[in-house]
Amino acid sequence: MSVPKKPLLKPFFLLLVFLSFLLFFHLYLQSKKTPISSAIAPSSTAALIRIRPGFRSYDDYIKLQLNKTLNPRLRHLWATRDWERKVRVFSRFFGDLAAEGLLSNATAALCVGARLGQEVAALRGLGVGGALGMDLVPAPPLVVAGDFHAQPFPDESFDFEFSNVFDHALYPDRFAAEVERTLRPGGVAVLHVAVHRRGDKYSANDLLGGVDGLVALFNHSEVVRVRKVDGFGLDTEVVLRKTNTKVWWYQLYVVWLTWEQTMYRWRMFEPRCSRRRSWFLVGTSNGFLT
């Protein structure tokens, strides 16, 4: 007598419910991503970061940043007398990071707010051939155009990101979110910031009382270390590592799917086991197995 197969409706229904939950959760996260508007909107900046007043719109902020980036005198200085000095200092910083195992020749590296690209040149000089810079104004071949509030790169594009322009972010939370978005799990972010000094007139925010406000913005990273540095008016280096935040739901799904498959196999196998147990018990009682 054949054992009727049990319907598979329940596992498929549960799978459908689970996938629907993932879809709605994804749509919810997407709805939280708002584009940068021309008007200044309240930011979820940590209490220990002060946004400087005076910006009536995002366009006003961009104009101020371009006043520095496109300044002919500054660009000439960056490209000539300042070039070798900055490359040398950046090389020392990156050399220390490489010695700590936070950077290697195979690293896909991004320098955020790279101006003409001295930090990119320093990385490439150390053998990091995939290093790239990003700034509002491109400087080929080292620097491409991009806004650090909305990086023009896909998710998880880089293993390493460096920036010494955090103080120029009008929306520090978006700056941090974009760094984490484009970093791969386990990737390293290195930020040079001013804690004991005040930024220049082009800065858009100030850290108050240390780096706690900065660290609090990186929701999916852990602090590797914080140390004092002397880097072109910036006095503190913060090193963070992105944690593996992407796979929790996938791991949950794998556990659930494994359980469902196990239960399905047990349901298919259990009737045969029951028949064998029945045969064994009957045979024992009749003396067949004695």
Image (cartoon, rainbow, N blue to C red):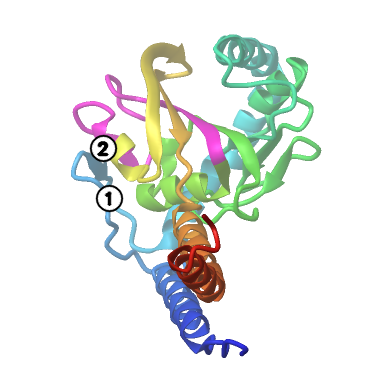
Alpha-carbon span between mark 2 and mark 1: 8 Å
Q: For the residue labelled by badge 2, is the local secondary structure a helix, a strand or a loop?
A: helix
Name the residue located 38 percent from the left edge and 63 percent from the top edge: 57
Amino acid, disc 1: Thr
- Pointers 2 and 1 in contact (C-beta within 8 Å): yes
Query: Which quadrant is home to the N terminus?
Result: bottom right
Mark nearer the N terminus (2 vs 1):
1
Quarter of the image for residue 176 reads top left
Q: For the residue labelled by badge 1, is the local secondary structure a helix, a strand or a loop?
A: loop
Q: Is residue 247 above or below residue 75?
A: below
Residue 206 is covered by the magenta coloring: yes
Q: Is residue 200 visible?
A: no
Horizontal side, residue 241 vs residue 207: left or right: right
**Residue bearing mark 1:** 45
**Residue bearing mark 2:** 213
Judging depth in this view, the residue of 56 and 184 nearest the camera is 184
Residue 280 placement (x, y as % from top left): 50, 65
Amino acid, disc 2: Gly
Quarter of the image for residue 76 reads top right
Q: Is residue 71 above or below residue 31?
A: above
Residue 216 placement (x, y as % from top left): 29, 40
Q: Is residue 180 above or below residue 210?
A: below
Name the residue located 50 percent from the left edge and 71 percent from the top edge: 270
Q: Which residues are magenta?
A: 185-214
Residue 61 placement (x, y as % from top left): 43, 54
